[in-house]
Image (cartoon, rainbow, N blue to C red):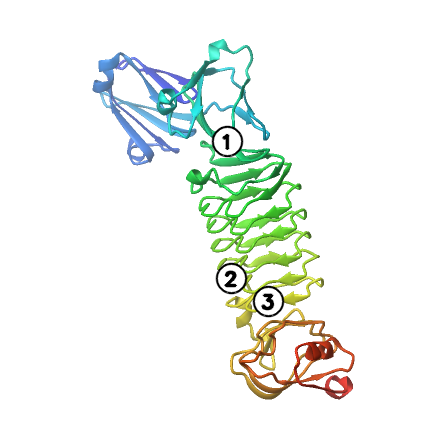
Amino acid sequence: ETPSTVTERGMQFKIDNLEDVKTIRYAYGEYETEKDIKHGEMAVSHSAKILRKRGDSCVLQFPKAGLVSIVIIYNDGSRDFYKYEVIKSSPTVTRDGGNDITFGELSNLKVIRYAKGEFENSNQIKNAANSVAVSGKNLNSDTYTVTLDRETYTFCVQYNDESYNYYVTGFCGDNLTWVYDMQSDTLTISGEGEMEDAVPWYEYISEIKTVVVNQGVTKLNSRAFDGGVSITAVDLPNTLKEIGGHAFNNCISLKSFVLPDCVTLLGQQAFEKCTNLESVILGDGIECIREFTFYECESLVDVTFGNNLKTIDYNAFQACYALDDIDLPDSLISVGEDAFNATAYYNNKDNWDDGLLYLDGHLIYAPPFLNKSSVIIKNGTKSISNFVFYEADISVVFIPQSVTYMAPSAFGDVYAPYPFLQVVKGSYAEEYAIEWEIPYGYYNPSDIYG
């Protein structure tokens, strides 16, 4: 049999002389046998009999970059095997918050097509109203810049090797733009200032894998990436100040997150139900972790708190079932009720003392209907969370002088009678008892704590 000749070119693999060819197969991956190729990833089979109706050669057009194994099977049963690294030609894309968008590395360009609106393929763009086509033959350099209005556009950049690259772009703030790269599933936000309330990339939210926020952006709005189930990486700039509530809800593929020191506001429920999130580093700019911020982050095991944290609001880490080792900063003043409820920390008996649960000097929980005539809070305790003694049946509570904060309903309310507080004269606890009209008396610290 006369062997075929092959030519490799980018996304294409050309095979000449099909006269004695029976079948052509290929699949993504590295395979050594026809059987493995036949059952490999994205396997394709072509009958040469059908291909010959179009001529004595064929071009395999691959859909994506990557290693491909190819087998040419001849009529006499012989086989030729090839390994081909499919390389996709791609442009650089630059848009910095204004009306201009620039494409680079276009030396092998066939055509750029674009139109207002959101489209899935080149034909849709070509047939759209006011569609524009720019031939590579007409470019004087390997870059192309076009000025757009404040609408959403879809671009197709097609190279001579039949590499197709699709981009969707628009505005997301007065001076902010976004570009979604459909090849890498990367969303890039650029420009200066705050993001607007809308989420213009919502149609692609489940496909986005990487989020890049460039220098100059100061705010990401609420629900910016809510439902981003494929997001695995987030890159934030040192200009960012605020992340809105629910911003990363249900980002179930996100495993780690680093919040830079520049961020001073992290909205409530920002990472709710990020079920595979394992590690979080919170920067020094955060003074408050708001309610339900990490609710049901059930895989979370490692949290690094910033050095200026003052408050952890209620239910902030509730249902983070794997969280056990918690190291709070010295700057912390208060921990909200149920902030760490349903975490592994509750299950460690070493964290309990005389029926009460402490966390780094903060009294955070007492079991419902705890029945004691008196309770002595550990010396060195800094705060008492809301509703700790709400359902407890305790007559007297001794409060050490070290306590500098107690939540308004730490001991109950009109529906749950207050216990009698034993306080040190001139202490914060005395001021608290007076403010909330709770019965109190004095004790000598040396008599209780030695």
Pointer 1: residues within 10 angstroms few (<14), some, or many (20+)?
many
Residue 438 percent coordinates (x, y): 65, 82
**Is the residue under label 3 in contact with that under label 2 (CB below 8 Å)?**
no
Q: Quadrant of residue 314?
A: bottom right
Which residue is painted at 48% across and 29% down in the image? 151
Type of amino acid under label 2 = Cys
Type of amino acid under label 1 = Gly
Circle 3 residue: 336
Q: Specify whether residue 384 is in view.
A: yes
Pointer 2: residues within 10 angstroms few (<14), some, or many (20+)?
many
- Tell which of 409 and 214 is nearer to you: 409
Residue 303, numbered circle: none
Q: What SS does tag 3 mark?
A: loop
Whole-number angstrom distance, CA of label 2 to CA of label 1: 37 Å
Circle 2 residue: 320
- Tell which of 213 and 358 is nearer to you: 213
**Is the residue under label 3 in contact with that under label 1 (CB below 8 Å)?**
no
Circle 1 residue: 170
